[in-house]
Amino acid sequence: MPILLLTLPLLTVLCSALPPVETEVEADYVLRGATVYDGTGAKGDKADVAIRGERIVAVGKFTASGKPRIIDAVGLIVAPGFIDLHTHSDESLTQEKTNANLCYVHQGVTTVVTGNCGFGPTDVGAYFQKLEKRKTGTNVIHLVPHNAVREAVLKNANRAPKADELQKMEALVDQGMKDGAWGLSTGLIYNPGTYSRTDEIVALAKVAARNGGFYASHIRDEGTGALVAIDEALTVGRDAGLPVHISHLKASGPKSWGKAGDEVALIERARKAGQAVTADQYPYTASSTSLAAMVIPAQYREGEHKEFLERLADAEQGPKIRKAIEEQIGGKEGAKRLRVARYKPKPQWQGKDLDALATAENSTPLDIVLEIQRNGGAQMVNFGMSEEDVRLIMRQPFVATASDGSSQLITADTVPHPRSYGCFARKISHYSLAEKVVPLEQALRSATGLPADILKLPERGYLKPAYFADVMVFDPKTYHDVATYDKPHQYATGVRYVFVNGKLVIDEGKFTEELPGKVLRHQGKSVEKK
Ligand SMILES: [Zn+2]
């Protein structure tokens, strides 16, 4: 066919010489004149974006038909809606005052993952129905939570499961995956997951693997034992045959400062050897979790609350427990790092650290801890990371942005970690645009295409025609986090428009009262696609 061979190149030359023919698309919305970042990590490009129904229908140059609302986006940045791989919004999204997920929507988040750190509903089907009945501001994805699965079968026992108990746990994971969960999560510093051995996790991860899911882990030790703990997660991935995701990667506690490089190197080695390994991070030097998980060694947390109190009162065990807690607190400097975030019996303690409380109450940090534990425990903020480690982890191309927060009520009287309100805005405004730790295209990819790839989430996470219209539009001059450690309940500023499934949730910076979020159900291995 010599004619075809000759004419094809000729045709190409002719075509490129002609002015581009603008395609015509029917649209409900046209974002005009924006700088578009598509989620791949490519630099921004001037383009228009058209949305019709639930979908993006065009990106680039086109003429719009129908009666679209034209949004002037000159000077603004358009990106795929952010995907938060790690939240604890399981409860709050099912509740009337927090289902709109406003602290996230105001940052440009359109999808959140629940079921993290091994916590959350095990009856995935019932949970999804509850969410659909309540309706949500963002899409929701769920993981099967290991702590809750173990609790359902073994309560808070410090032992390995018997064969029939393991089978029950496997059945729960299998049912959760079949009901639409995207993987298995563990939280191995928490009860009762902390009592599991690696072989138990491998067995359960195999069930997730069979269903096309991944393994996300709050690893067993985020401090001096982090390398061993990462290695355990890698073992689970290899033995069960599924991708591994390290949640909120960090080097926690002054003794671990400077060790983030070793953690990254270990993950890099596994990646180079062909293993699928990723991580996420929130851009802060403080973490947040329960006081018990922070300062009471796991062997003393077995069983029911009253058993802990009995052990504490015991003449032999009591002094050992006190000594162990004191060691964990780490003296005056350690007590200064630990700040009360939520403690219902004494809200006036919220926002204050253990050292300050001990001084004010004429007590010791240990006795403050014991009083809190006797009254049911507290949520804490721990200023335990170094700035250099946070930045080093952030630079890694396999690290996604994820908040580890939850949907908050802005009028709440608590003093939680500011990450629920500021995580994504802080990474982009402070670390990328101001401090240049990562280029903007990488900061945006880490909140969009990368988390979508980690989840193997179809048709979201990228700004492409035919993809779902989860789209966020922000003004780079005014986009920033406002939430601080002292005053966390403040929305981020600068997000102008947020579309969730083609519906405006934020319009000219304001919440529209729309709740177009969907439960996104994992479809199992057969339709796994990219
Ligand atoms: Zn966690």
Image: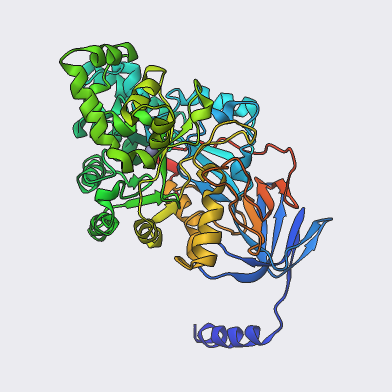
Q: What colour scheme was applied to this rendering of the protein? A: rainbow
Instruction: Give residue 509's position: percent from left, percent from top.
Output: 72, 51
Residue 159 in view, yes or no: no
Residue 248 is at least partly visible in this image: yes
Q: Choose top left, top right, bottom left or bottom right for residue 10.
A: bottom right
Residue 147's place in the image compared with 317, above or below, is: below
170 versus 307 height, above or below: below
**Residue 359 or residue 63, whichever sits in front:** 359
Q: In this view, does 459 lie to the left or right of 206?
A: right
Name the residue at the front extreme.
362
Residue in the image at 55% along x and 32% along y: 414
Spot occupied by residue 24 in the image (x, y as percentages of width and height)? 75, 65
Query: x and y percent of residue 428 in the render?
Result: 53, 59
User: Which quarter holds ligand 1?
Assistant: top left
Front in this rendered view, residue 27 or 348: 348
Residue most extreme to the right: 67
Left or right of 412, for residue 74: right
Residue 317 x, y percent position in the rendering: 18, 17
> Number of numbered discs present?
0
In the visual, does 413 lie left or right of 231?
Answer: right
Which of 400/503 is in front? Answer: 400
Q: Which of 324 and 102 is in front in this view?
A: 324
